Amino acid sequence: MQPGQMRLIRKIAAVAVISAACPAALGAVAMMGCSTVKGMSATCALNGIFVSPFLLLGAGVAAALLVSGWAGLVLVWAGVAIGMTAILGLTYLVGNLVPIDPFAAFIAWVWFIAPTALGYGIGRGVSRLVARR
């Protein structure tokens, strides 16, 4: 396999990791019982607040091990956009469509991109420190 092909595969893998992490983070909240008939309770929401960011943080670190630089950060952003679109598609397939308005979409984007980008930064920092040795 040639180096150019390997870089392309790594870029695709990074986007796939991030794209899968977004629905998985939301799914972790749903699996905790948040999607009950009564709706989301305060306890369940707090559990989701603690679980989801760590999952997204780990996905950012994994992406940082696959790609680097500003192009890698753009791929992380693209992965979050694809993941959020996947969430919308999955909720449509299940029959419980998420209401979309610009303010809620912006909050959701910040909720997903912040820990993912932080994880990417941490992963790049660690990989640079290891590379110096």
Image (cartoon, rainbow, N blue to C red):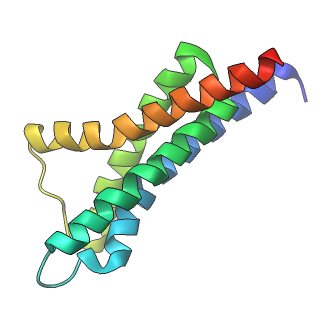
State the image quarter where residue 117 is shown: top left
In this orientation, does residue 81 appear?
Answer: no
Marks counted in the figure total 0
Could you say where residue 9 lies in the image, as x and y percent from the top left? 72, 34
State the image quarter where residue 30 is shown: bottom left
Could you say where residue 8 lies in the image, as x and y percent from the top left? 70, 27
Relative placement, left or right, of 104 versus 18 is left
In this orientation, does residue 80 appear?
Answer: yes
**Residue drawn at point x = 27 percent, y = 38 percent:** 109
State the image quarter where residue 37 is shown: bottom left
**Residue drawn at point x = 35 percent, y = 58 percent:** 50
Relative placement, left or right, of 73 versus 108 is right
The C terminus sits in image quarter: top right
Residue furthest to the bottom in view is: 37
Check the image and report above or below for 40 versus 15: below
Could you say where residue 6 lies in the image, as x and y percent from the top left? 80, 29
Could you say where residue 5 lies in the image, as x and y percent from the top left? 79, 26
Decide which of 41, 31 is in the foreground and name it: 41
Decide which of 4, 133 is in the foreground and name it: 133
Check the image and report above or below for 103 versus 11: below
The N terminus sits in image quarter: top right
Relative placement, left or right, of 27 versus 39 is right
**Residue drawn at point x = 13 percent, y = 76 percent:** 39
